[in-house]
Image: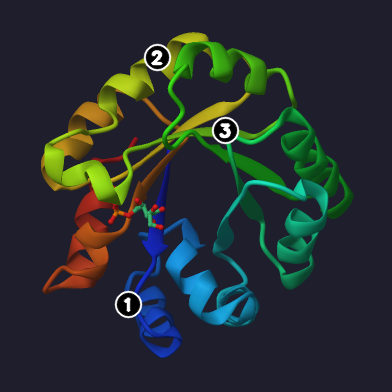
Amino acid sequence: MKLQVALDTLTLEDCLTLLEETKGSVDIAEVGTPFIIEEGMRPVREFKKHFPDIEVLADAKIMDAGELEAETAFKAGADIVTVLGASNDETILGAVKAAKKYHGKIMIDMIAVKNLEERTKEIDAMGVDYICVHTAFDVQSSGKDPLDELKIVNRVIQHAQSAVAGGVKLSTIDAIVEEGAGIIVVGGAICNAQARAEAAKEMKRHLR
Ligand SMILES: O=C([C@H](O)CO)[C@H](O)[C@H](O)COP(=O)(O)O
């Protein structure tokens, strides 16, 4: 089980400080979608340069031009690139092709996918590495959390590992750990904590 910290809204300098502070707790540093919109692939390059031992995930949320866009992220040094599960199969397969070329991995983000069970089965057969259930930031305030969707994905997958994202915090992590996931993604609960290193350490302590 790996802990991925989602870096969405901090400056590049603050992200580097956070990754230094949380060394030993964080397995994967995510360059979040808002960060990519702000800075492009620069944070991917910088994270890789400063922290060669931490995996870097580019949360590009690719929806089209799968091969081309995944290749851009892998060329910048990303180890894992995200593609939306709602994309066409051709887009996902294109990204998988780029991943093979660069020895990288593809995480499929199932955000807003309605037919979760059926789509998970289809995507699981496409050679992706992770299938991530994700409660969107914009619906988290309604009290929705990703645990029920994680149970569906875990029941269905035969090849990929599951991952989980969307408002994960210390009070919800144990139930997720109990259910099982290859990667647990935590953004705000670490980045907005008063003591970020402690928060990451505590999260990591709960993982198996
Ligand atoms: O992917 C994310 C979101 O869609 C914004 O781009 C977040 O990185 C992900 O949800 C994790 O962040 P938290 O929900 O704050 O844990």
Split into quadrants, the picture shows ligand 1 in the one at bottom left
Residue 31 position, x and y percent, is 50, 66
Residue positioned 74% across, 58% down in the render: 69
Residue positioned 18% across, 47% down in the render: 169
Rendering quarter of residue 8: bottom left
**Gap in Å between the C-alphas at discs 1 and 3?**
36 Å
- Which image quarter is the N terminus in? top left
Other residues around mark 2 within 10 Å, as few (<14) / some (14–19) / many (≥20): some
Look at the picture and state if 115 lies above or below 193: above
Disc 1 residue type? Answer: Glu
Between tags 1 and 3, which lies in front?
A: 3
Look at the picture and state if 18 lies above or below 72: below
Residue 170 position, x and y percent, is 15, 46
Mark 3 Cβ inside 8 Å of ligand 1: no
The residue where tag 3 is placed is 86
Camera sees residue 202? yes
Dot 3: element: loop
**Gap in Å between the C-alphas at discs 1 and 2?**
35 Å
Disc 3 residue type? Answer: Ala
Q: Is residue 56 left or right of residue 3?
A: right
Residue 139 position, x and y percent, is 24, 42
Q: Earlier in the sequence, mark 1 or mark 2?
A: 1
Between tags 2 and 3, which lies in front?
A: 3
Disc 2 residue type? Answer: Ile
Camera sees residue 32? no
The residue where tag 1 is placed is 21
**199 vs 127, nearest the viewer:** 127
Answer yes or no: do the residues labelled 1 and 3 have beta carbons within 8 Å? no
The residue where tag 2 is placed is 152
**Gap in Å between the C-alphas at discs 2 and 3?**
17 Å
Residue positioned 27% across, 26% down in the render: 147
Q: Which mark is residue 69?
A: none
